[in-house]
């Protein structure tokens, strides 16, 4: 009887499935090629600094890789639109968190996919309640989602997007520093800053 049948966590099986999903996401949204993997890389580096369990780190790794899976349902003309999105277009983009949550939550492996689904749902929430989709405040947001939120914004600002050129890592780190304890968890921000400024973290 294999590990899925007995309900045990098998990272090798999960990694294979998640890698496949990641490739599908990147084909659907080529403008963010590599984004998911870089977010996962930074999220894991942050999680390790908090000395989380290996299983928790593995779940964060998976959540980071597929955090934008809901974008497979977003029209390509919106995902790849150059320039600023219209209000209604941004409202469509915001649906990707709920869509992703529903996709992952519907799987039969609820014991492991539940925490991943919550991270996908909440990775655009903000500490002050100004995020989406539900306007959750700090104590209502899961810690893995707080980690992915910081990694996501740092990666997004560092690299090119259809609507703007890359802003660079210095600008990204300044953003999370300025919005610490407003948008982003202060503990996560401090660890992220330390990784880049002291540990010389680099995206691969």
Image (cartoon, grey):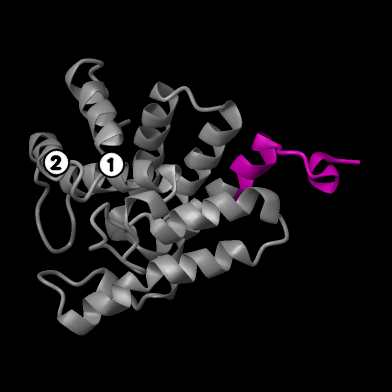
- In the figure, is residue 91 to the left or right of 74? left
Q: Quadrant of the N terminus?
A: top right
User: How much space separates mark 2 and mark 1, taking CA atoms?
Assistant: 15 Å
Image label count:
2
What kind of element bears circle 2?
helix
Magenta stretch: includes residue 98: no
Residue at label 2? 172
User: Where does residue 95 sit, x and y in percent of width and height?
Assistant: 37, 74
Q: Main secondary structure of the magenta part?
A: helix
Question: Residue at the spot x=23%, y=80% of the render?
Answer: 89
Label ID, residue 185: 1
User: Where does residue 122 sit, x and y in percent of width and height?
Assistant: 40, 57
User: Where does residue 17 sit, x and y in percent of width and height?
Assistant: 62, 49
The span shown in magenta is: 1-17
| Residue at far right of view | 1
User: Where does residue 120 sit, x and y in percent of width and height?
Assistant: 45, 57
Crowd rating for badge 1 (residues with CA inside 10 Å; few <14, some 14–19, many 20+):
many
What kind of element bears circle 1?
loop
Question: Residue at the spot x=9%, y=52% of the render?
Answer: 165
Label ID, residue 151: none
């Amino acid at each position: 009887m294999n590990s899925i049948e007995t309900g045990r966590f098998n990272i090798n099986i999960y990694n294979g499935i998640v890698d496949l999903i990641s490739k599908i996401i990147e084909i659907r949204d080529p403008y963010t090629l590599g984004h998911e993997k870089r977010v996962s890389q930074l999220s894991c580096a942050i999680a390790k600094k908090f000395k989380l369990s290996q299983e928790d780190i593995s779940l964060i790794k998976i959540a980071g890789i597929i955090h934008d899976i809901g974008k497979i349902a977003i029209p390509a003309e919106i995902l790849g639109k150059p320039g600023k999105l219209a209000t209604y277009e941004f409202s469509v983009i915001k649906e990707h968190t709920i869509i992703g949550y529903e996709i992952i939550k519907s799987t039969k492996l609820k014991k492991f996919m539940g925490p991943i689904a919550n991270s996908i749902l909440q990775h655009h929430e903000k500490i002050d309640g100004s995020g989406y989709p539900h306007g959750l405040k700090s104590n209502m947001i899961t810690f893995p989602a707080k980690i992915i939120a910081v990694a996501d914004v740092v990666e997004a600002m560092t690299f090119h997007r259809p609507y703007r050129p890359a802003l660079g890592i210095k600008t990204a780190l300044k953003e999370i520093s300025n919005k610490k304890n407003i948008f982003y968890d202060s503990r996560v921000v401090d660890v992220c800053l330390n990784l880049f400024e002291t540990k010389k973290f680099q995206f691969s």
